[in-house]
Image: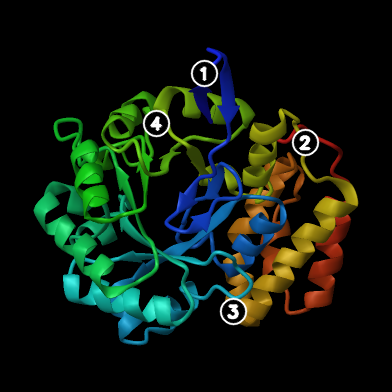
């Protein structure tokens, strides 16, 4: 929103649509890329509940190029619009080739991961480890930009540790090179997910990249978080990650709240029961029965916890349900269990 002073001396509010390159943003909330969570079924559900953008799970660029089945599946985006593929890697060649391959397969945006703190990623000099060497990080950015015609975005942390807060420098260099949106998680890599995300520190990035959308990430789980995050960071959008565990509707609910001020309740009763069963079926369709059941277990636990029913589950309930070979029995049990959940506040 801009305030423009007219010749009369009065001010008028003018709405300015945010875009990633030429792609308009529907609202101010993005579902974070989360390995093992934000797969195609999860992204589809989140979109249906109104989140503005969703991002694929992190895809290793070299594995994508060499045809690794899991990486190919992670990069899928059927029914997702716009389709954003997040790539990670340490080699400019593979980043460029991976981006080119993703674009050819239908990606509308390529997001570069320089924020993942996982040891198995940083030990391979990918993810947030790249923030220890900004010159090398920029070779990956430049290789990706040169490889594709679609917009390229970048996700990062504040820095490697508290002694090297270099997100502003990396963001400025990336935007100068042609990156169209910056996302900053308000923690350093050394913090992992401990403590509280420092939303105010993200404002240092806003100060140096005022002309592209800035996304604030970290600890946005409820309505008030979004208000505070935007106010403290100066960002244009918020990204919701772990706050969507077991609550894929929350990013969309927060988007609706930011637009209207209305606090929609969580799905409950028949709507929630149908959603959980739908998610179970979608996982089986995506991965096949055996892998799909295993992949759904964590979601099952999160749904129970979010619904306040985790402690109600009898001993062995989840194990028995998630090892059953009778899909119809599982569907009926899930429905009967969640249909009893009463109305609750959303966030």
- In terms of secondary structure, where does tag 4 sit? loop
Q: Is residue 177 left or right of residue 149?
A: left
Q: Nearer the viewer, mark 1 or mark 4?
A: 1
Q: Nearer the viewer, mark 3 or mark 4?
A: 4
Q: Which residue is mark 3?
A: 287
Vertical comparison of 140 with 46: above or below: below
What scheme was used to colour the molecule? rainbow
Q: Which residue is mark 1?
A: 7
Label 2 to label 3, Cα distance in Å?
32 Å
Residue shown at 52% from the left, 35% from the top? 220
Q: Which residue in the rendered view is the most extreme toward the bottom?
A: 67
Residue shown at 64% from the left, 38% from the top? 254
- Asked if the residue under mark 2 is in contact with the one under mark 1, i.e. CB atoms within 8 Å, the reply is no
Residue 276 on image: x %, y %? 75, 59
Q: Which residue is mark 2?
A: 264
Q: Residues within 10 Å of mark 3 (few under 14, many from 20)?
A: some
Q: Is residue 124 visible?
A: no
Instruction: Give the tally of numbered discs.
Output: 4
Q: Earlier in the sequence, mark 2 or mark 3?
A: 2
Query: Which numbered dot is residue 197?
Result: 4
Asked which quadrant contains residue 225, the reply is top right
Residue shown at 34% from the left, 35% from the top? 210
Q: Earlier in the sequence, mark 1 or mark 2?
A: 1
Asked which quadrant contains residue 183, the reply is top left
Q: Is residue 181 visible?
A: yes
Vertical comparison of 275 with 205: above or below: below
Label 3 to label 4, Cα distance in Å?
34 Å
- Foreground pick, 151 / 101: 151
Q: Residues within 10 Å of mark 2 (few under 14, many from 20)?
A: some
Q: Nearer the viewer, mark 4 or mark 2?
A: 2
Residue 171 on image: x %, y %? 25, 44
Label 1 to label 4, Cα distance in Å?
43 Å
């Amino acid at each position: 929103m801009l305030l423009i002073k007219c010749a009369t001396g009065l001010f008028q509010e003018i709405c300015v649509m945010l875009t990633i390159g030429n792609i308009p943003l529907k609202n101010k909330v993005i579902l974070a890329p989360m390995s093992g969570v934000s797969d195609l079924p999860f992204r589809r559900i989140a979109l249906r509940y109104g989140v503005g953008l969703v991002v694929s799970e992190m895809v290793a660029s070299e594995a994508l190029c060499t045809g690794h089945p899991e990486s190919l599946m992670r990069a899928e985006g059927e029914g997702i619009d716009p389709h954003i593929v997040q790539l990670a890697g340490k080699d400019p060649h593979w980043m460029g080739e991976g981006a080119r391959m993703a674009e050819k397969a239908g990606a509308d945006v390529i997001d570069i991961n320089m924020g993942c703190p996982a040891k198995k990623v940083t030990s391979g000099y990918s993810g947030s480890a790249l923030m220890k060497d900004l010159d090398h990080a920029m070779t990956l950015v430049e290789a990706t930009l040169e490889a594709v015609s679609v917009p390229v975005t970048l996700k990062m942390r504040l820095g490697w540790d508290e002694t090297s807060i270099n997100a502003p420098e990396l963001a400025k260099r990336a935007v100068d090179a042609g990156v169209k949106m910056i996302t900053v998680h308000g923690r350093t890599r050394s913090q992992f997910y401990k403590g509280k995300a420092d939303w105010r520190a993200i404002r240092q990035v806003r100060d140096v990249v005022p002309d592209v959308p800035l996304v604030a990430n970290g600890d946005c789980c409820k309505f008030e978080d979004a208000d505070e995050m935007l106010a403290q960071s100066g960002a244009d959008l918020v990204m919701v990650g772990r706050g969507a565990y077991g609550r894929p509707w929350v990013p969309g609910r927060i988007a609706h709240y930011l637009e209207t001020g209305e606090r929609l309740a969580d799905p409950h009763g028949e709507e929630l029961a149908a959603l959980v069963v739908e998610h179970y079926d979608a996982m089986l369709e995506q991965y096949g029965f055996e892998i799909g059941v295993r992949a759904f277990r964590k979601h099952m636990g999160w749904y129970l916890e979010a619904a306040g029913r985790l402690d109600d589950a009898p001993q062995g309930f989840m194990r028995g349900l998630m090892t059953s070979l009778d899909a119809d029995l599982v569907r009926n049990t899930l429905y009967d269990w969640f249909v009893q959940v009463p109305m609750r506040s959303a966030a």
